[in-house]
Amino acid sequence: MSTPAPALLWTAATSAASDRHTMETLGVPSLLLMERAALCVSHEVAAILRGRGGAVGVLVGPGNNGGDGLAVARQLRGWGIPAEAWLVTDKHNQVVAEQLALARAMGVTVHRGRPSDDASRRLWVDGLLGTGSRGAPRGAVGEAVEWLLGHEAECVAIDLPTGIDPDTGVVSGPAVRARCTVTFARSKPGLHITPGRGHAGRVVVADIGLVDPPDMDDRLALLDPVGVANTLRRLPAGSHKGQRGHLGIVGGSPGTTGAALLAGVAALRSGAGLVTVASPDPGLGSMLLAARPELMTAPLVDEPGRLLPRAQALVVGPGLTDEASQRLLARLFREDPRPALWDASALDHVPADGAMPTGPRVITPHPGEAARLLARIDPEVGWSSALVQSERLEAARRIAEATHALVVLKGEGTLIATPDGLAWVAISGGPALATAGSGDVLAGFGGALLARGAGPTTAARIAVHVHGVAGESLGDGPGPIALDVAEALPRVMSTLVEDPSHPRWPSWRRG
């Protein structure tokens, strides 16, 4: 079993500050750091080739990433693995020049320009651009990426796949799709946030001797499954239903009652002792009796102080689509002192005036809902779903700051952000969650945890990770529905307590 990497994520700015602190303040030679970095990449390449053999090609860019690539080619050749390098640009920095001289002295064949088609069967190392690059790769570098994509060549990326923004995961043009990415010191947000997450492959974090800068920003990390498992173990079991919490669900308008049903089933499956649904649909009671008799119903009153008075926490929004019911929402968000999770159409009624709600709040938008909320918070910015997807971390943090709520920005690589700027990137989740109602299941799960006494941060972290693993457990093929995800929750929680490891968690290698 590989050693798991640290959860902390470094942005490009943090990485650059660490480089400067280690080399300029502490006096560690840059050549030593580069050699250690290259050794970690070389070991991953050798491991892939073990038992199958083959030759390696290294694409060398103009900066330090290219220097790393040339060092990899030199090391592999020294180990008896056929390796050649291609300098894809005419200009390069002094680091590349120094590594080029060393590589040639060791007998590495170095070509200029883009590889020819007959070289495409190699295992490739992407040493084109590193964390200092922004935007779409241009010129000869962009052509090299296009060549690599056109030949569907297997690739190991140095630090991050070329074309991926290290901080946001945004893909602005052609971008390398790596089988494995070897990144240095700490993983980078862009390797785990959509869409960059789909390009990174297996992530290996290499300890090459970089030292944290004294003023390092440590507010962003991966959502650690070990921490989730430890918290699950500490949740009180409850000897009777009253000790397991009473959750109220506000939702289920005529025509969309299924959303409230899904949230209720998820809440029961995740441990709530009692669940009551307040709905404007007079036919909901008979539907629940037939579909899930464990759920209770109550009238949907328009006075926050009289709504579901016995419930200890609320989920507001699943299937709540009629205008008459939505009139109470802004007051409910501000005035109700109970912890509450807000989802779906209710998010359009979350106050955007910066007022502090009376009780703890968790809000769970998808990108479209987030864009509509941000358009009310920052109308001059021009927020859209596309802009939210390109600035997911900034979007989540801005909503959290403006609403004083913990934000769960859904999607592959779901983000959790607190009002004080802490944020986590989820590693779990998959195609099974791309189905109608999966968000209602997440809402019901998070609400049940609030009713059981978990704080907003704890509830969100558990719900997001377990919900994602439940989706993964149903496979990648078509067919799973949201109710399947809800029914999988008890099994997944039990399994995670015994073994919290996750295949997408980065491994740790010392150089």
Image (cartoon, rainbow, N blue to C red):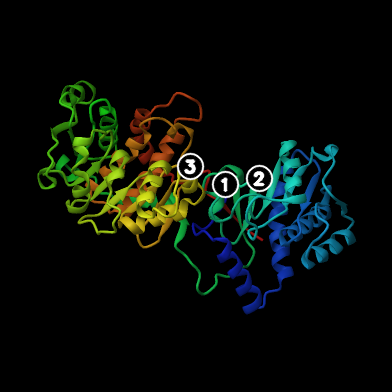
Q: Amino acid at mark 3?
A: Glu
Distance between mark 3 and mark 1 Cα atoms? 10 Å
Which mark sits nearer the N-terminus, 2 or 3?
Answer: 2
Q: How many marks?
A: 3
Q: Quadrant of residue 187?
A: bottom right
Q: Is residue 26 visible?
A: no
Q: Quadrant of residue 497?
A: top left
**With 174 as the anchor, is 445 left or right in this view?**
left
Distance between mark 2 and mark 1 Cα atoms? 9 Å
The x, y position of residue 272, in whole percent, is 23, 40
Q: Amino acid at mark 2?
A: Ala
Residue 9 against residue 375 in the figure, above or below: below
Q: Which secondary structure lies at badge 3?
A: loop
Q: Which residue is mark 2?
A: 175
User: Residue 377 or 47: which is nearer the viewer?
Assistant: 377
Q: Which secondary structure lies at badge 1?
A: loop
**With 91 as the anchor, is 197 left or right in this view?**
left
**With 402 as the anchor, is 131 left or right in this view?**
right
Check whether the beta carbons of the residues at disc 2 and disc 3 lie within 8 A of each other: no
Q: Amino acid at mark 1?
A: Gly
The x, y position of residue 325, in whole percent, is 19, 37
Residue at 67% x, 57% y is: 130
Q: Which residue is mark 1?
A: 196
Q: Which residue is mark 3?
A: 412
Check whether the beta carbons of the residues at disc 2 and disc 1 lie within 8 A of each other: yes
